[in-house]
Amino acid sequence: MNPEEARRILDSAELIRSEAEVTAAVRRVAQSITEALSERNPLVLAVMGGATIFAGHLLPLLRFPLEYDYLHATRYGDSTTGGELAWVVEPRTPVTGRIVLLVDDILDEGITLAAIRERLLRQGAEGCYTAVFADKEIGRTKPIVPNFIGLTLPNRFVFGFGMDIEGAWRNLPAIYAVAE
């Protein structure tokens, strides 16, 4: 997407969660994670690329020992609709016997996060918690319920705070929805 098109999309988009709401949500999630995992020395795995922004804001608020790594598995690629799950990068840190905290940007249908969680458990993780910045209300049951949720969002195409639109606007501090 060229810069002019990206600006046009943002200019016509609807702000649905302000920067202040985003910041408050990250703080709430950090507090809940701290209460649940501060004595567990978890391995935190960010799901690239969307979780980069959420993880970058979340990790400094987790004031307890943890290890950090990442993975990249996707059903989207450059598309806006999900397809077959592709593993791009596996975590370098072994998960066997570990408590794992998966961090992701948004739970849409939940298929990708559920598959990642199941794979980590099959690889020997002792337990696998999930934290998503946003849970999209899609109107049907999902195969996974996150342990920690920052915000609930409407069933619209959203972007900002790690979520992109055709590769653009992950860097926004607030959440926007594409104009309907």
Image: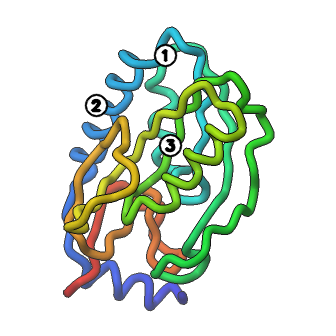
Q: Residue at x 50, y 81 (%)?
A: 166
Question: Mark 1 — residue?
Answer: 63
Question: What distance separates the C-alpha of mark 3 from that of mark 1?
Answer: 16 Å
User: Dividing the picture into quarters, in which one does residue 36 lie?
Assistant: top left
Looking at the picture, tell me which residue is in the foreground, 58 or 3: 58
Q: Label 1: state its secondary structure.
A: loop
Q: Residues within 10 Å of mark 2 (few under 14, many from 20)?
A: some
- Specify whether 8 is left or right of 88: left
At which x and y percent is residue 3?
50, 85
- 3 or 2: mark nearer the eye: 3
Amino acid on which disc 1 is placed: Arg
The residue at 54%/89% (across/down) is 2
**To which residue does mark 2 refer?**
28
Q: Which mark is residue 103?
A: 3
> In the depicted view, which residue is nearer to us: 54 or 35?
35
Query: Is disc 1 surrounded by few (<14), some (14 to 19) or many (20+) residues within 10 Å?
Result: few
